[in-house]
């Protein structure tokens, strides 16, 4: 076992052949990081997860209205996924005036911009995290109020 002081050192140890396995957070094991260090050899990511990192959105605490806006958009993207609404069918999604008339198409606009939650995940997170089909990133089944319940026991 070799220990690195930072991510750059860890990747360089792999590229130089001083180690042949990387064990770190899921987000840092992506092949993208290794290729950025000019590594051209084979790279395979194992399927056994030893950690689970939830993803989330952070907003400034001094602007609760903006935080609410972001949260509503995120929930709309999730609902769009559940209803099989995509960028192409975004106009079928509901409108709202909760933030005023000028934002009545906020959900439709968001879906048209990035797609539903799965689309967003696949584009921006899939390269760094386990597949969206992973149990970690599925919506809960209604047995908890949490959007992301930490799994208990064995998966």
Image (spheres, rainbow, N blue to C red):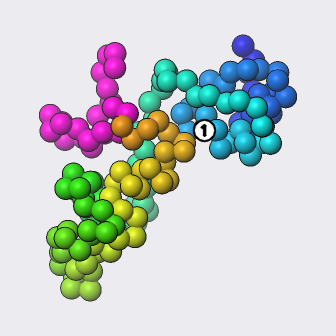
Residue 16 rendering spot, x and y as whole percentages? 85, 28
Taking the magenta stretch, the answer to whether it contains residue 49 is no
Left or right, 123 with reference to 135: right
User: Would you name the residue on which mark 1 appears?
Assistant: 30
**Nearest the eye: 151 or 139:** 139
In the rendered view of the protein, which quadrant contains the N terminus? Answer: top right
**Magenta residue check for 150:** yes
Q: Residue at x 54, y 45 (%)?
A: 127
Main SS, magenta residues: loop
**Tag 1, which secondary structure?**
loop
Q: Quadrant of residue 140?
A: top left
- Magenta residues (range): 134-155
Residue found at x 18% / y 36%:
141
Residue that sits furthest to the right in the current view: 16
119 vs 105: above or below: above
Spot occupied by residue 47 in the image (x, y as percentages of width and height): 49, 24
82 versus 65 height, above or below: above
Q: Nearer the viewer, residue 91 or 129?
A: 91
Q: Is residue 143 above or below residue 91?
A: above
């Amino acid at each position: 076992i070799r220990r690195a002081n930072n991510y750059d050192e860890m990747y360089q140890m792999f590229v130089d052949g001083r180690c042949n396995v990387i064990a770190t957070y899921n987000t840092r094991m992506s092949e993208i990081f290794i290729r950025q260090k000019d590594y051209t050899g084979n790279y395979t990511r194992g399927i056994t997860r030893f950690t689970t990192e939830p993803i989330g959105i952070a907003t400034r605490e001094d602007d609760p209205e903006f935080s609410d806006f972001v949260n509503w958009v995120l929930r709309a993207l999730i609902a769009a996924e559940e209803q099989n609404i995509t960028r192409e069918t975004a106009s079928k999604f509901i409108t709202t005036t909760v933030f005023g008339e000028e934002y009545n198409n906020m959900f439709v606009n968001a879906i048209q911009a990035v797609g539903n939650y799965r689309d967003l995940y696949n584009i921006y997170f899939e390269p760094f995290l386990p597949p969206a089909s992973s149990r970690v990133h599925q919506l809960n089944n209604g047995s908890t109020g949490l959007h992301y319940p930490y799994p208990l026991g064995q998966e």
